Amino acid sequence: MIFLFTKQCPLSHTFPPESKRTNKMSAESDMEYSDNDGDDYDYYGEQDDCDMETVDRTKADPEYFLYSCLRVEEVEKLLNESIELLSNSLQITPSLAKVTLHAYEWNAQEIINKYKENANEVLVYSRVKSRVALGQAGSSRASCAVCASTPHLPKYSALACGHYFCNDCWSMHFEVQIKQGVSNTIQCMAQDCEVIAPEDFVLSHVTKPTLRERYQQFMFKDHVKSHPQLRFCPGPNCQWIFQAWAREGARRVECRGCELLTCFSCGAPHHAPTDCATIRRWLTKCADDSETANYISAHTKDCPKCQICIEKNGGCNHMQCGACRHDFCWVCLGDWKTHGSEYYECSRYKEDPNLANDSQHAQAREALKKYLHYYERWENHARSLKLEEQTLANLKRRINQKVMAGQGTWIDWQYLWDAARLLKRCRYTLQYTYPFAYYMEIGPRKELFEYQQAQLEAEIENLSWKVERAETTHRGDLENQMDIAEKRRTTLLKDFLEFNTKSISGSSKV
Amino acid sequence: MANIAAKRVKREIKEVMKSEEIMGGAFKLELINNSWTELQGEITGPPDTPYESGKFLLEIKVPETYPFNPPKIRFITKIWHPNVSSVTGAICLDILKDQWAAALTLRTVLLSIQALLSEAEPDDPQDAVVARQYKEYPSIFAMTATHWTNVYAEGKKAIVDYNRRVQVLLEMGVEEHQARVALSTHNWNLEVATEELFS
């Protein structure tokens, strides 16, 4: 019955809502990169005219997501543009504009509109002004309530709330706060006063150059973190910043610096087809069950035929025992011959049908067994991916050697490199199909998913086998295999990636 | 910075000495070892609460960065309260953490702690066991808190029944405070407490 779900799947052809969304994005991006100085921040414009190019890209790559990878200076410029726009149109200082933008998640247009309606409300909400009327909130300038000394009148200052303190106390207050990493939300020193000190006020009281610098660094980090269209690349010591216009579903962004794949929506490693909430659950579960995970992650397995101990040294799961030449699958330890056919099913977990009548204990065991099944495969592909990384490095070295030896140019061997990169990409997706399958409800949709997953897995192993033996494999054969593997991957993503299927499940209910 | 801290603490003590709370006996504040970095406070349990007439000692440590950072305060006297750890005496109070403002003083903090004794915040607990009892068995909570006040803070009201149960465990050779904690934790169920102590 599984054969019912082959290529003619009716679900995979409905696409209009997604293409609509891409159009919108492309229109937005045009605005972003245009040279006019309008600084129009209306990213959510209503233009719907068709842009064939981006539509095509989404079809070829279901994970396609419009984003850019920016340097710190570019982001600074971007932020400054918003700040300037706001401070010009509302006639407020750039420092106050920063406080307001931070409070309103950098939606300058919303601030401008609300400001026209009720300027006071905007300032109170941004904590620029106190909700309490000035007369009641203000304090005297006879003595400083913080240090208890009585300096001369000119040595006092206050924020918009009118709470006067001596300048020495202000600078001490800012020093302590900056050292604790606070920047955008340093509050007034008065009790129950939530008014925030804007940048110019802070800097006028902080003189130490190192402290000023730190303050501005924290400020920038805070701005990026509070900006819905920006996200730091989570790579260690990586300075790049992503910019994108949507924050829901698994959204792939790749860093130009460290090449790390990240999900723009949640900041975790990219995880399509699994969605953000599910991957969080899965990763927590894996961390909690580390005891069992330790037990599983033994790095060696015995050959199913001659029982010799084997350590896996490549990404491919099609294993050949060095001692007895037995071909087997590293994942299920079954004979590889059964994997060659279309009916590849070692990725499928078989639920025991008699389970319902069993005792709780048996159910718990079954639950653990189920988890281990998915976890083992998840771990295994993660390890394979690491090894694939080595294959990639080796390949690069070998190509360089060939080029040096005069056997063709880089262009001639480019296809090998492409194959290894593609293999990495496919295995990455495959790894993230396991948490997805684990949390899926049993039913025809899960069967379809696991069928496609098995298909993908089989083709990936074929590809991996061929890439590892690239020199002896015919180029046409390899390229054909690449095409098949990538097709399987995109088909699976098209059918199951959350933001693709949302519209489908909506329309299929009719 | 230490200058400001010392100056502030000295002034605050002077201020507290003159204040009406000292006159009315609501709390005390004194230096330890004549250094401004460590103080001892004492607050009286507010009337019409389980803590009524109890005397609770507080350890107050003043950081060098005071008043730009809050003082570190914990209960020395053992107390049964959802926002105070029954083990360490640590207090969960917003103005001692992120809501601290430099213009706040030791006097206002002591008043806030006293107010916390009258009105607990069980949804923001420091001691989860106490907080659960507070929500699920309010009358047992009130009696337990009264009992602890009586035993540890010179509170005048004794809970005879609870004293008797502690006594039962003492006769079995259990240490007194350990016995009290076990009984308090298990809503004064002797059997469950015994089982936990001897398992």
Image: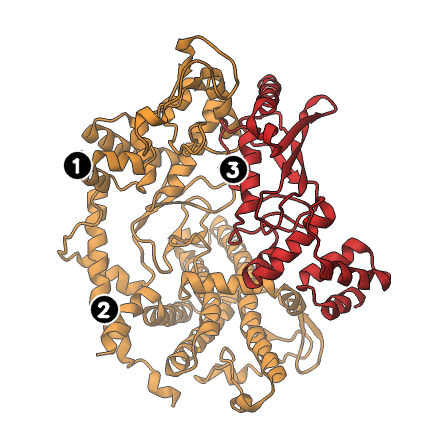
Residue under the point 57% across and 78% down = A367
Q: Residue beneath label 2, please?
A: A15
Label 1–label 3 contact, CB within 8 A:
no
Q: Colour of chain A?
A: orange
Q: Which x, y percent locates residue B29?
A: 65, 29
Quadrant in the picture for residue A408: bottom left
Q: Earlier in the sequence, mark 2 or mark 1?
A: 2
Q: For the residue labelled by badge 1, is the local secondary structure a helix, a strand or a loop?
A: helix
Q: Are marks 1 and 3 on the same chain?
A: no
Camera-side residue of A29 and B24: B24
Task: Determine the residue positioned at 53% across, 38% down.
Answer: B112
Say which residue label 3 marks.
Answer: B95
Residue B87 appears in the figure: no
**Residue B147 shows in this picture:** yes
Badge 3 and badge 2 both on one subunit: no
> What amino acid is at disc 2?
Phe
Quarter of the image containing the N terminus of chain A? bottom left
The residue to which callout 1 is attached is A116
Distance of label 1 from label 3 (alpha carbons): 36 Å
Front-most of residues A129 and B80: B80
Which residue type carries mark 3? Ile
Label 3 – label 2 distance at C-alpha:
55 Å
Q: Residue B59: x, y in percent?
A: 68, 35
> Could you say which chain is coloured red in the image?
B
Relative to A457, A332 lies left or right? right
User: Disc 1 sits on a residue from what chain?
Assistant: A
In which quarter of the view is residue A331 placed? bottom right
Depth check, mark 1 against mark 3: the one in front is 3
Question: Which chain is disc 3 placed on?
Answer: B
Q: CA distance from mark 2 to mark 1?
A: 41 Å
- Element type at marker 3? helix
